[in-house]
Image (cartoon, rainbow, N blue to C red):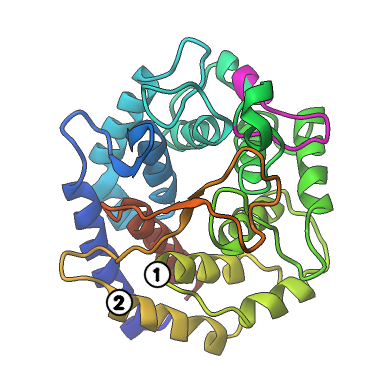
Amino acid sequence: MNCERTKGLERVLGWSLEYILSQQRRDGSWVDWDLPPGESSIWTTAFVGCRLRGLPPGLRERASVSTGLASDWLDERMFPDSGWGYNEEVGSDADSTALAILFLASEGKRVREASYACLQSFQCTDGGFATYRGHPDLGSWAVSHTDVTPAAVLAMMTKYGVAGETVDRGLQFVLNHKTPAGIWHPFWWTSFLYSTEISLLLLKAARLNMNLRGTRETLLDTCPQHPFESALLVSSLLSLPRCPQDHDIWPLVVELIEDQASDGSWRSGPMLRVSRRDHLEAWKPGDPDQLFSDQNHLFTTAMVIDALSRVYTFL
C-alpha cells in the first residue's frame, strides 16, 4: 500500500465525511434536490447511507452513530405498502425502496418480508424494474429502467443471493441491455456513467464472468463533466474484472482531490433528468427534459466518498 497516497485519501475522506455529517438533520435524515414534488428526504437519506457503506474502518466507525440514526429514521418512514419514495408526499418507487433495503441491510436492520414483496411488485414482464408501478398516465415512467433495475436486483440479493426467479430475471434484463459500446443507457440521469456504474456493481456482486473489454475501452475514452461523473467513472473502472492500471485511475483521483471545496464537499452539475412521460429513450439528444443539480451537494459528495473509499481499498 502506498502510504503517502493512503494518508492523503484518509484526509480527504475525513474532510468530506465531516461535510456529510454536518448536513444531517437532527432527526437523522439528509435532504437534497428541489424537484417538482419538493425536496427529497427519503430517497436522499437512502442514497447517502448506501454510499457510506464502503468507508475505511476508522471512518465508518466515526460515522456509525449518524448512519444508525439515519437508518432508524428511514425504517420509521416506511410507507403503508412497505416501500419508500422520493419524499413523504409521493408514493413508493422502486429506486427509493431498493436503496432503503440496501442501506437498512448494511446497518444490520431487519428488512421486512413485505418490503421485498413491495419491491418485487415493480418488476416488469421483461425482468427489469420500473421506477413506478404501471398506470396508463405514467407512460415511460412505468417501464423497465436500466438505471433502476440493478439497484433493485442488488436489494433482492440481500435476501435471495443470486438464486430465485426475481434475481435471475433482473440479471438477464441487465445483461440484455448492455449496448454494443459496453455501456447501459440511463433514463433518469444525464450520463450513462450512472446506469453503467450500478450495472457493473451488480455484475461484480453476482460474480458473473463476461467480456467487458468494450466497456473498458468506452470508459477510458470518457471525459467526465463534473465530480459526480468522475466518481462514477472511477467506481466503474474499479468494478471491471481485470484491475485497471494505475495510470487509468490515479489522474481521476487527483482531479477529484483538487476539486474538493473548502467545506469538504464537491460542486454539482446538471445530472438528474425528469424525463417526459411520452419519451421512452430519454438518453437520446434533443429531448427537452428538466435537468437538476443536487443543491446541497449530498449526492455528489456521497458518490465521491464511495469512489475514493474503493480506491483506498484498492491501494
Magenta part mainly helix, strand or loop?
loop
Residue 162 position, x and y percent, is 75, 39
Q: Which mark is residue 259?
A: 2
**Looking at this view, is 237 or 149 the one in front?**
149
Q: Is residue 22 above or below residue 213?
A: above
**Whole-number angstrom distance, CA of label 1 to CA of label 2:** 8 Å
Q: How many marks?
A: 2
Residue 120 position, x and y percent, is 68, 24
Disc 2 residue type (three-letter) = Asp
Residue 26 position, x and y percent, is 15, 32
Residue 201 drawn in magenta? no
Whether residue 36 is visible to the viewer of this picture, yes or no, is: yes
Report which quarter residue 214 is drawn in.
Answer: bottom right
**Looking at this view, is 4 or 24 the one in front?**
24
Give neighbour class at mark 1: few <14, some 14-19, many 20+ (Cα, 10 Å): many
Give neighbour class at mark 2: few <14, some 14-19, many 20+ (Cα, 10 Å): some
Please say if the residues under marks 1 and 2 sit with CB atoms less than 8 Å apart. yes
In which quadrant is the N terminus drawn? bottom left
Disc 1 residue type (three-letter) = Pro
**Secondary element at image label 1:** helix
Q: Is residue 60 above or below residue 30?
A: below
**Secondary element at image label 2:** helix
Task: Report whether 265 appears left or right of 136.
Answer: left
Report which quarter residue 160 is drawn in.
Answer: top right
User: Which residue has dot 1 on it?
Assistant: 227
What residue is at 45 percent from the left and 80 percent from the top? 252
Residue 187 position, x and y percent, is 62, 49
The span shown in magenta is 117-131
What residue is at 44 percent from the left and 44 percent from the top? 50
Whether residue 243 is visible to the viewer of this picture, yes or no, is: no
Q: Is residue 163 above or below residue 171?
A: above
**Looking at this view, is 73 or 281 the one in front?**
281
